[in-house]
Image (spheres, rainbow, N blue to C red):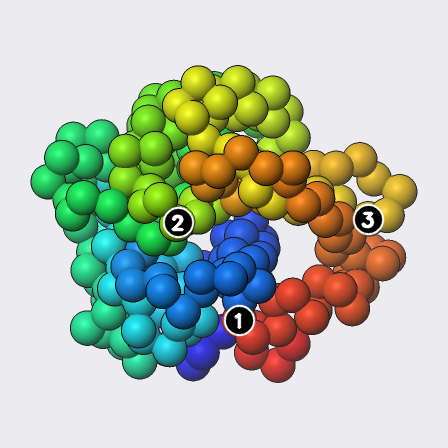
Amino acid sequence: MDDSACAMKVGTDSILLGSWAARCLDEYPTSEQYLNGLDIGAGSGLLALMLSQWAAGKLRITAVEIDADAARQANQNVAASPWPDSIEVVNSDIVVSNNTLQSTFDVIVSNPPYFSVPHGETRSQQGFSNPRKVARSETALTLSSLFAVIRAKLSTKGLAFIVLPTEQAGAARRVSEQHGLCVQRQLEIRSLPEKPVSRLCLAYGLTQTTPNIDKLNIYAAPNVYTEEYRALCRAYYLHF
């Protein structure tokens, strides 16, 4: 990523989601019409900054983050970036602030909370602080609440991008359909070719269609990135 963001804590899920969203937006017919974006659960601001880099600062982004410390870090990262005037960080609960935001957004991104309990010591949660566990659990934001906000805020031409572990795929399908959201594209992610799919990146819109399904392996062998992963994420890593 740009030098301005090199000090940020970078998670593989967010890098994958932001990189894939940028590729999808490049390939979507109305990409030049996108004017504004919403980052739900912005954390340190990584996804908002990735969207700004993709759009060369021409996308107006609202980054909503419930945790005050994370929101402060996001503000610092935005201020140090080449696009300080393109991103507004809002320290708020997205469900509470939903009605105070502008009417709709053309691009929505979220690396949402997906653990069922805030303090369960799953392998993925080991080492998390208590605020981090809450932020990454459905105590902070349920899938139903997330999809309700996306449905309320997504413009008719817009796309919403999320990343989820595969075990949440069934619930996400049911809840998104209940809210009238349709999968447009899907990326199935494996750590290694012989491993099962562990993550899904999903792009939602308001139009019923047969989704375009792609596959991605992160590693060709332990600690050896595949060329397809490098090609997808190269623009957002330094020296990659």
Residue pushed farthest left? 100
Q: For this view, does 201 lie left or right of residue 104?
A: right
Residue plotted at (43% across, 45% down): 160
**Which residue type does callout 3 highlight?**
Leu
Crowd around label 2: few <14 · some 14–19 · many ≥20 (10 Å)? many
Q: Position of residue 145 (x, y in %)?
A: 33, 25
Residue plotted at (44% across, 18% down): 178
Q: For this view, does 210 lie left or right of residue 18?
A: right
The residue identified by callout 2 is 158
- Tell me, yes or no, if residue 166 can be seen here: yes
Q: Which one is earlier in the sequence, the residue at label 3 or at label 1?
A: 3
Give above or below for 186 relative to 142: below
Q: Which one is earlier in the sequence, the residue at label 3 or at label 2?
A: 2
**Which residue type does callout 2 highlight?**
Gly
Q: Position of residue 117 (x, y in %)?
A: 44, 19
Front: mark 3 or 2: 2
Instruction: Say what secondary structure mark 2 lies in.
Output: strand
Give above or below for 200 relative to 11: above
Q: Which one is earlier in the sequence, the residue at label 2 or at label 1?
A: 2
